[in-house]
Amino acid sequence: MKITALAGGIGGARFLRGVLAAEPDAEVTVIGNTGDDIWVHGLRVCPDLDTVMYTLGGGISAERGWGREGETFTVKDELADYGVEPTWFGLGDKDIATHLVRTQSMQAGFTLTDITAALCARWQPGVRLIPMTDDRAETNVIVDDPDGAADTAGRPMQIAIHFQEWWIKYRAHIPAHGFVLVGVDNARPAPGVIEAIEQADVVLLPPSNPVVSIGTILQVPGIADALRSTNAPVIGVSPIVGGAPVRGMADACLKAIGLETTALAVAGHYGARSHGGGLIDGWLIDTTDAASVTAIESLGIRCRAVPLMMTDLDATRAMAVQALSLANLT
């Protein structure tokens, strides 16, 4: 079986552990979000690619869900003592090695696709991990100037800040007026991305942020069209349970684009392929949202309510089994 998944960070990575447990013999390709990528202290950091790689390769911090297990932050503390910004973005000492290898390889002319494959040769994640694009396309957030600057009429000045600054420094507490993927107009899908979608037996949208993870991947020209035209069923897993994100601040992202924080609203956001123009055929929601099954199916999307809390590997494997079952593959 060929499985292709579009994934962000922690939620996507943990769900993929369940996919591998459910179908250990499957050929799994993961298309990773790179809109979160950022330059920090001269190093190129790819948070979502690394979270998938570390999680599936057994090196992730189980407590944090990001970064390395047994990590220390000596370099971060030393830089802060020097007053070097950004002090709000913490690079772990072990993690820095990954970013050094990536940055040096980029400077030598290698593509992000090639570099990611080389990094994965160490970690052996059990999947083919590829970035959504080799081109630079970074998510920026439109916000009112945090310093309170105003125009001549006294209205708050709107500025664009990098997604990581909004997410980590401000914890998404500054209301977002919108998101802009800077550079996407000139971006192309990385080698193998379109083929992985076209040749899949099933395409999965894990419980990643629908706006700034899955939504970012879908903005790369050609990827959404490939989802619409693939012969494979496309099955999504809701990141919203009981009206709240399972993890992170997806509610702030959904609010910024005018959507309610519900499993139904996110299903409608993706839309039904059967109705033309949509992206998914099936949608898994949590049992606490079971009352929404009928409304979701009225959109033309097959829906099933099952437990969606990834409390351990067995629970996550059961979620993956349900997703494949909804695709009529098990």
Image: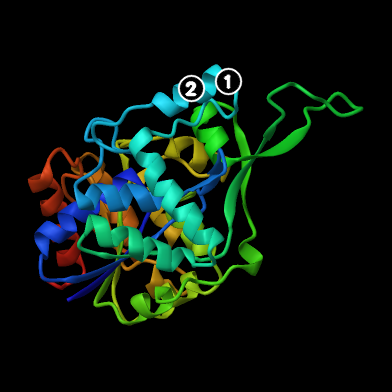
Quadrant location of the N terminus in the rendered image: bottom left
Calculate the distance from the C-alpha at mark 2 to the C-alpha at mark 1: 6 Å
Q: Quadrant of residue 72?
A: top left
Kindly identify which residue carries mark 2.
78
- Farthest right residue in view: 152
Q: Disc 1 marks which amino acid?
A: Tyr
- Visible residue check, residue 238: no
Q: Position of residue 91 (x, y in %)?
A: 43, 34
Vertical comparison of 261 with 321: above or below: above
Give the number of marks: 2
Q: Is residue 235 left or right of residue 166?
A: left
Residue 185, position in %: x, y?
A: 65, 66
Q: Tell me which residue sits at (34%, 76%) in the image.
A: 196
Q: Quadrant of residue 278?
A: bottom left
**Residue closest to the far top:** 81
Residue situated in front as seen by the camera: 237 or 69 = 69
Quick check: 312 left or right of 178? left
- Position of 94 with respect to 255 (left or right) is left
Which residue position holds label 1?
Answer: 82
Q: Nearer the viewer, residue 26 or 86?
A: 86
Give the answer, above or below, for where 76 lies relative to 295.
above
Residue at horizontal 34%, vertical 65%? 117
Q: Is residue 115 above or below residue 40?
A: below
Quadrant hosting residue 109: bottom right
Q: Residue 32 placed where, x, y %?
A: 39, 59
Q: Amino acid at mark 2?
A: Glu
Query: Which type of secondary structure does the marked residue at label 1 adopt?
Result: loop
Residue at 26% from the left image edge and 42% from the top image edge: 289
User: Can residue 262 be spotted in the picture?
Assistant: yes
Q: Residues within 10 Å of mark 2 (few under 14, many from 20)?
A: few
Secondary structure of residue under mark 2? helix
Mark 2 and 1 residues: CB-CB less than 8 Å, in contact? yes
